[in-house]
Image: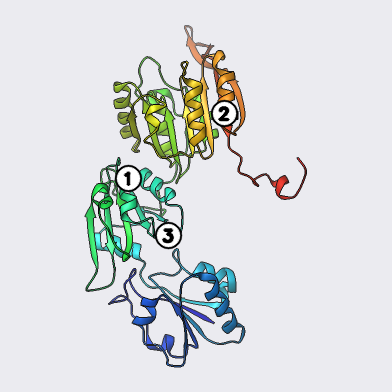
Amino acid sequence: MITVVGTGTGQGTGTGAPVASDVVSGAELVVGGRRHLDAVPLPATADRIVLGPLAPALDAIEEYVGKDRRVVVLASGDPGFFGIVRALAERFGPDRLDVRPGVSSVAAAFARLGLTWDDAVVVSAHGRDPRTAVNVCRARPKVAVLTGPGAGPAELGAALRHCARTLVVATALGDPERERVERVTPGDAAARDWGTDVSVVLSLDETRLRAGARTVAGPEVPPAGWALDEAAFDHRDSMITKFEVRALALARLGPRLGDLVWDIGSGSGSVAVECARLGAAVSAVEKAADGVGRIRANARAHGVDVHAVHGTAPEALAGLDDPDAVFVGGGGRELPEIVGVCARRAQRTVVVAMAALDRVPAVRSALTDAGFGCDGVLLQSSRLAPLPGDVTRLAATNPVFLLWGTRTPVGSNPLERKGVAL
């Protein structure tokens, strides 16, 4: 049997949930971080392993478990919450584990603020690419980030510099002498050296925190519908991506929580807002100043956060983080150049809407030259329209070419993985 014990609140071991002596008294092997091992009275006969790389520790545990010798693993907070329980269960099976959780650093941090966290998104940047955590903080109003080297308060603050966020940095939670919970701006966070004792960082958009009881924990459920009617957005002279086009564009963009989407030539921001409603972080680039104001107003009306950038592509793209997906609307002579820049930086897909047939070959070449597989359709639709006498006619909308390029990662084709010649 492997006993897994959460030793305290967050990273500290001070007054938070001390380990009972009987838990470790019969242990023949005790595994944990150095601070955990130093804080708990261990049997003199027990072997100890200070956790570093996980694989050697798991191999050692397997030797003891195979001989029915008792193992205790000490961890921070709740080891079943982004913790070592996952690795242990995958290696030895959940039936071999006796898990005794402490209070997680996330629960403790929200408790210090007197805030509920059933509506929070929790994301780990520990040992992971921090861009997912950053994009979740951009998109959601209440986020807890489990930090790590290269993904601490300073890095989060630098990435969120354009966002109206309050960062709450919780350090050494559970330690009565060193614990600190500080509210700072992203700029202040970016300018400081926070050391190695940060337990968790909370990112709060206090203008969008909502009251009321919850039924389902976690982020808000994605909307039941999308491709909203044009009347759901403030727009100028029908300069808006029509809902039929938006429906297919959203399907090809695939916006989701943790993604960053660019909306280039955003106009009213209808595509940007819809991507944000589906959970993505969004940067919308628009050259008209009144258009930027309209994008922000539409985002507020739909309760989402869109980073509106006043500028002209491709120059305005230089200061933006690389996107997962890009939507490009409109189209002048510079359209192929803009699409090429977007394609070279996009992680997954680029979708382009055009009214002019003449632009299609050059845009297609811009996508394929950047290594994308390219496909597209000509969308032609007719909407029901009333006529006098209580009858209905079909009113044709302007046809639109929709092209999309998709980057195919090496080895993602199932036939390639099976060794089938293509």
Which residue is the site of mark 1?
160
- Kindly state the secondary structure of the residue where label 3 is placed: loop
Quadrant of the rendered image containing residue 239: top left
Q: Nearer the viewer, mark 3 or mark 2?
A: 2
Residue 81 appears left or right of 111: right
- Residue 322: percent from the left, percent from the top? 44, 39
Which residue is the site of mark 2?
367
Q: Nearer the viewer, residue 408 or 79?
A: 408
Q: Earlier in the sequence, mark 2 or mark 1?
A: 1
Q: Earlier in the sequence, mark 1 or mark 3?
A: 3
Picture layout, residue 346 above or below residue 15? above
Which residue is the site of mark 3?
126
- Within-10-Å neighbours for mark 2: few <14, some 14–19, many 20+: many
Is label 3 in contact with label 2 (beta carbons under 8 Å)? no
- Identify the amino acid type marked 1: Leu
- Kindly state the secondary structure of the residue where label 2 is placed: helix
